Image (cartoon, helix red, strand yellow):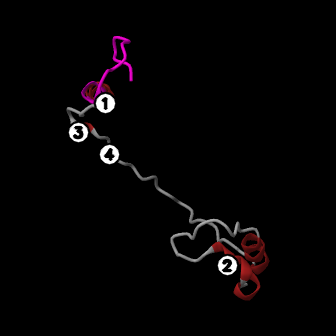
Amino acid sequence: MRKLSGELTENDVENVTELNNFLSRVFTIEKDITAVPDIVTPDIEEPMEDLIVTREQVKIKLSKLKVHKSSGPDNIKPCLLKQFSTHLT
């Protein structure tokens, strides 16, 4: 690891010191956290249109799943969804 001066560090203590010095320059503590702006939600006049999803669209999406990927938040494996896509749709 190089020091700010360009010299190489010689031991673990110097490594830790240089890393600490770097991180203390990068991360700062905000002085005034009360200056955070308010979140303004827009007024929505029109509701969102109905979403129409067909069985065929779902079947196509399920057939394109990559079976070697991990499960999603529902813990259902993609290989099972793909294998049973005909029964699910």
Q: Earlier in the sequence, mark 1 or mark 3?
A: 1
Residue 61's x, y, as percent? 73, 70
Q: Mark 2 = which residue?
A: 81
Q: Residue at x 53, y 75 (%)?
A: 75
Q: Mark 4 = which residue?
A: 38
**Circle 3: residue type:** Ile
Figure quadrant of residue 71: bottom right
Label for residue 40? none
Label for residue 23? 1
Q: Secondary structure at mark 4?
A: loop
Q: Nearer the viewer, residue 20 or 65?
A: 20
Q: Mark 3 = which residue?
A: 33
Whether 58 is drawn above or below 23: the answer is below
Mark 1 and mark 3: Cα distance apart in space:
21 Å
* Segment colored magenta: 1-16
Q: Secondary structure at mark 2?
A: helix
